[in-house]
Amino acid sequence: MTDLNENNIDFNFNLRIVEALIFASPEPVSFNELKKTIPDIDILEAILESLEKKYSSGGFNLYKINNSFAFRTSPDVSEFLNVETIIPRPLSRAASETLAIIAYHQPVTRAEIENIRGVSFSRGTLDALLELNWIKPGQRKSTPGNPLTWRTSDTFLDHFGLKNISDLPGIDDLKSSGLLEKDNIIFKDDPAK
């Protein structure tokens, strides 16, 4: 049986390695990536649990996003941070609708997306979402032609503050926020076009 005693020098050294790997990464680090450094799953899970506890009351916390880990600012102090970022141009209506369809219906093919939207869309729509790294290719569907499916990525979850795709708001949440009201214009598309 593996010694998981947190007073163990090896455990503390391995904890520092995992902590540094997650801290230095600009993207969430997958459990499988961490396993390459700490192959013993019991020790790795104990390390992650220890890090979660260590940072639970700090200015930043260890978050589990699907099966990946990242340090993020604690919600109670985030309002005091002012970070200047370059804001990319807003998504077009087509890209926003496509992203929503992928998020709620994944894995989904291009033809299924077009069928749900009721119109076809240009390749640039998927390219914009791929460039943001919000979607990724899924497995090919076992139907004639073996079309490629699309899924959301962990970057999508991280960007929108979701720990899992099941955290997406439901229809009642969207209605109560007013996003589904007919007169609510949330896109930058020119209605005259």
Image (tube, grey):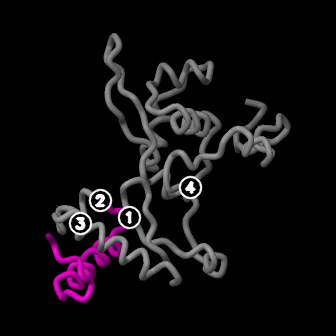
Q: Nearer the viewer, mark 4 or mark 2?
A: 2
Q: Which residue is mark 1?
A: 69
Q: Quadrant of the C terminus?
A: top right
Q: Which residue is mark 4?
A: 160
Q: Amino acid type of disc 3?
A: Asp
Give whichever of 26, 43 is nearer the camera. Answer: 43
Nearer to us of marks 4 and 3 is 3
Q: CA distance from mark 2 to mark 3?
A: 12 Å
Tell me which residue sits at (34%, 10%) in the image: 144
**Location of residue 160 in the rendering, given as x and y in whole percent from the top left corner:** 56, 55
Mark 2 falls on what kind of element? helix
Which image quarter holds the N terminus?
bottom left
| Residue that carries the numbered disc 3 in the rendered image | 42
Q: Amino acid at mark 1?
A: Phe
The tag earlier along the polypeptide, 4 or 1, is 1
Q: CA gap, disc 4 to disc 2?
A: 21 Å
Q: CA distance from mark 2 to mark 1?
A: 7 Å
Residue at (39%, 29%) from the top-left corner? 149
**What residue range appears in magenta?**
1-29
